[in-house]
Image: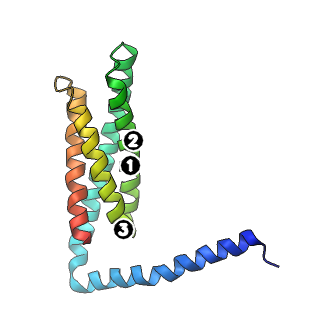
Amino acid sequence: MIGRRQFGTLGLSALGLAAFPSFAAAQARRAASGHDDHLNKALMDCAAACNACQQACDSCAVHCMKQVAEGHEAHLVTAQFCLDCADVCANAARVVSRGGPLSKLICDACAVACDRCAQECEKFPDDEHMKQCAQECRKCEKACKEMVMHLM
């Protein structure tokens, strides 16, 4: 006898399999149209930009925490933005690199996160570390927006 938990798991699995054919069909249409090569390049470029941004944001968050420890309280909010942006970028890189069906959604979110993080880091124009983080965020934001255009 199947319990409720197993029945629920089977139902979700069936739902996932039911959605897969439409995703696979869309992938096949793109491949047949020659759009696939451009899409694959955009996917890999976007994933690389997201990875670079994640690393820059993690590094900047550590830098900001050191600033906070030295009494520069204004860096606390920026550190939080950097940590959140790093997480969004890391997840976007994973979803995009495998060409997941939620790539557009995560790229939209990543572009917004990168814009907000860059705005926070740009509040400290004399800090080279934060300037570099803002630059990586702007590159990632651009790559994500380009990725979204490929997925429309």
The quadrant in which residue 46 appears is bottom left
Amino acid type, label 3: Gly
Q: Which mark is residue 80?
A: none
Q: Determine whether label 2 and label 3 are within 8 Å by CB.
A: no
The quadrant in which residue 53 appears is top left
Amino acid type, label 2: Asp
Q: CA distance from mark 2 to mark 1?
A: 6 Å
- Image vertical order of residue 149 relative to residue 2, above or below: above
Mark 1 surroundings: few (<14), some (14-19) or many (≥20) residues within 10 A: many
The quadrant in which residue 119 appears is top left
Residue shown at 40%/79% (left/top)? 23
**What is the residue that sits farthest to the left in this orientation?**
125
Amino acid type, label 1: Val
Report the front residue among 7 and 143: 7
Mark 3 surroundings: few (<14), some (14-19) or many (≥20) residues within 10 A: some
The residue singled out by tag 3 in the image is 99
Q: CA distance from mark 3 to mark 1?
A: 16 Å
Q: Determine whether label 2 and label 1 are within 8 Å by CB.
A: yes
Left/right of residue 61 with respect to residue 9 in the rendered view = left
Residue shown at 36%/13% (left/top)? 70
Could you say where residue 118 lies in the image, as x and y percent from the top left?
A: 24, 39
| Dot placed on the residue nearer the N-terminal end, 2 or 3 | 2
Q: Which mark is residue 84?
A: 2
Residue shown at 67%/72% (left/top)? 8
> Element under label 3?
loop
Could you say where residue 152 lies in the image, as x and y percent from the top left?
A: 24, 72
Could you say where residue 125 lies in the image, as x and y percent from the top left?
A: 16, 27
The residue singled out by tag 1 in the image is 88
